[in-house]
């Protein structure tokens, strides 16, 4: 099974959202449909970045990193 971490950008206020899913494109549709409480108020969203992992643990570790201060700096350096 393949797992992805993904980064979304809100077109409403330019904020980022980092998440994990087996199906990031489907997940983007769910975010834009308002199914996710934490992102509902900031729609619409666009997918700006994703990474692929072979295991759930690798993906989870990367998600935690990207949500950390150093991870946010990493995304800033990529201009994401």
Image: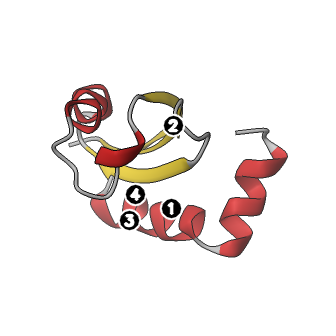
State yes or no: discs 3 and 2 in contact (Cβ < 8 Å).
no
Pinpoint residue 57: horizontal percent, then vertical percent.
Answer: 34, 67
Q: Nearer the viewer, mark 3 or mark 2?
A: 2
Q: Is residue 52 above or below residue 57?
A: above
How far apart marks 4 and 3 lie (CA) works out to 4 Å
How far apart marks 3 and 1 lie (CA) works out to 5 Å
Pinpoint residue 41: horizontal percent, then vertical percent.
Answer: 35, 47
Please say whether residue 53 is visible from this viewpoint.
no
State yes or no: discs 3 and 1 in contact (Cβ < 8 Å).
yes
Pinpoint residue 69: horizontal percent, then vertical percent.
Answer: 69, 73
What residue is pinned by disc 2?
Answer: 10
State yes or no: discs 4 and 2 in contact (Cβ < 8 Å).
no
Closer-to-camera residue (38/56): 38
What residue is pinned by disc 3?
Answer: 60
Name the quadrant containing residue 45. Answer: top left
Pinpoint residue 44: horizontal percent, then vertical percent.
Answer: 40, 29
* 29 on left or right of 4: left
Q: Nearer the viewer, mark 2 or mark 1?
A: 2
């Amino acid at each position: 099974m393949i797992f992805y971490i993904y980064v979304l950008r809100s077109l409403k206020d330019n904020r980022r959202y980092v998440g994990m899913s087996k199906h990031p494109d489907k997940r983007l549709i769910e975010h834009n449909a308002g199914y996710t409480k934490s992102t509902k108020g900031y729609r619409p969203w666009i997918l700006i970045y994703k990474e692929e992992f072979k295991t759930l643990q690798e993906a989870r570790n990367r998600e935690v990193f990207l949500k950390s201060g150093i991870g946010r700096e990493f995304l800033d350096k990529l201009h994401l």
